[in-house]
Image (cartoon, rainbow, N blue to C red):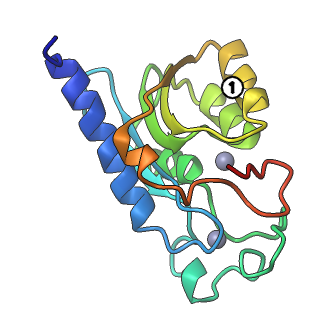
Amino acid sequence: MAETVNAIKDRLRMRAAHSMALSSSCLRRKVGAIIVDPEGVTLGMGKNDTMGNFARCGDGGCPECAKAVVGSASCLCVHAEQRAIGWAAELGFALRGATMYVTLVPCPMCAKQIVACGIKRVAFDGRYEGDGLARGILQAGGVVLWPMETEAEKALPARRGWPGHPFYWEG
Ligand SMILES: [Zn+2]
Ligand SMILES: [Zn+2]
């Protein structure tokens, strides 16, 4: 069966999220996110990395990411989902009813933020062990979850978590 126009658009948006991810310099993980309104207009996008005029993570901008075991509150990198939501806020776009395309299942913190700002659908690509908490938060918050599992994700074995992190998934 031929792919529908909407399915092609969805796949292109996830590919755009992967492009965002590839531009991340984060030493820990590269994740990308795109938010679109119900008409498909882009409202925000982001990658996990340091932000603003901070030195980039890959240039030593985040001391926590440079350590062997991931830190917590002292990490200076923002998550792709946070950055995309922040981008929309900076531009003055409301996110109620919007869809987020993100290259990896969000973490529980981002899941709460996604619910809180009214995003109604999350298309994700990669998975990690322990992602059930975040998926549960999103579902309880009324967010429709959509696993895409595109070829772009399968081609990127780097997305397998943090060594030393409780969510680390070997395999
Ligand atoms: Zn980082
Ligand atoms: Zn997160």
Q: Is residue 29 rendered to the left or right of residue 41?
A: right
Provide residue 148's location: percent of width, then percent of height.
Answer: 43, 28
Q: Residue at left 62%, top 12%?
A: 142
Up the image or down, 69 lies above or below 60; here it is above
Label count reads 1
Pick the residue in front: 138 or 28: 28
Q: Using the rendered view, name the quadrant where residue 21 is placed.
A: bottom left
Q: Is residue 42 rendered to the left or right of residue 32?
A: left
Decide if ligand 2 comes within 8 Å of the CB at mark 1: no
Q: Is residue 59 visible?
A: yes
Q: Residue at left 62%, top 60%?
A: 78
Provide residue 8's location: percent of width, then percent of height.
Answer: 20, 28
Pick the residue in front: 89 or 169: 169
Q: Residue at left 74%, top 39%?
A: 129
Q: Which residue position holds label 1?
A: 135
Provide residue 119's location: percent of width, then percent of height.
Answer: 52, 26
Up the image or down, 70 lies above or below 45; here it is below
Q: Quadrant of the N terminus?
A: top left
Badge 1 element: helix
Taking the image in four quarters, ligand 1 sits in the one at bottom right
Q: Is residue 116 rendered to the left or right of residue 2?
A: right
Name the amino acid, label 1. Arg
Pick the residue in front: 86 or 136: 136
Provide residue 137's location: percent of width, then percent of height.
Answer: 74, 23
Q: Is residue 55 visible?
A: no
Q: Residue at left 66%, top 23%?
A: 138
Structural crowding at the residue carrying mark 1, measured as other residues with C-alpha within 10 Å and reported as few (<14), some (14–19) or many (≥20): many
Residue occupying the far front of the picture: 171
